[in-house]
Amino acid sequence: MKITKLIKGGLFIYECIRVVLIAFVLYLQGIGGLSVKVIYTAPCALYPLMALFIMIGANRYKVYVPLFIAGKCIGVFMLLGWSIITRQVTMIESFILSGDFFSLAAALMINRDFRKQTEFNEQKQPAELPSSPEPEDK
């Protein structure tokens, strides 16, 4: 349980670093104006927000963990495909790709912990006894 809290915090920190790194790389490449950089960086900014919400209100936002996992899977496969097609892997791409693999593993661990908590809570609650029929009024 405590390790999952550390994982949630680490996931949030990594996602923030990732967005800053992507924005910095786009700035260095000098592609387009500010609007192009925002278009490329804005979708990446959703992941730190999801990680923040999962870290702060885990029980309330646990339904978004599968969405986080699906988005990470898409991102990993797209970046991996891009690296294979272009036949080049830069240091930044390898950092982002390895970090995405670790964040995917962390999200899977968080999801597993949520499932265990749900099963434990369901077993802990006593089964409801059938209520006796109420007498009919005549």
Image (spheres, rainbow, N blue to C red):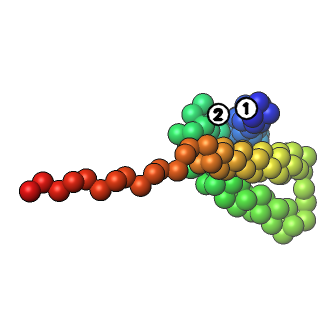
> Which marked residue is nearer to the observer: mark 2 or mark 1?
1
Residue that numbered label 2 is attached to: 55
Given residues 52 and 56, the one toward you in this image is 56
Q: Do the residues under discs 2 and 1 have CB atoms within 8 angstroms?
A: yes
Q: CA distance from mark 2 to mark 1?
A: 7 Å
Q: On the rendered image, what quadrant is the C terminus found in?
A: bottom left
List x then y, in percent, for residue 92: 85, 45
Residue 60, can we see it? yes
State whether residue 51 is above or below residue 129: above
- Mark 1 lies on residue: 5
- Horizontal relation, residue 138 to residue 59: left or right: left
Q: Amino acid at mark 2?
A: Met
In the image, taking residue 65 as reference, residue 128 lies left or right, namely left
Disc 2 on helix, strand or loop? helix
Looking at the image, which is closer to me, 75 or 64?
Answer: 64
Label 1 SS: helix
Quarter residue 55 falls in: top right
- Compared with 4, 85 (above or below) is below
Relative image position of residue 45 (x, y in whole percent) = 62, 41
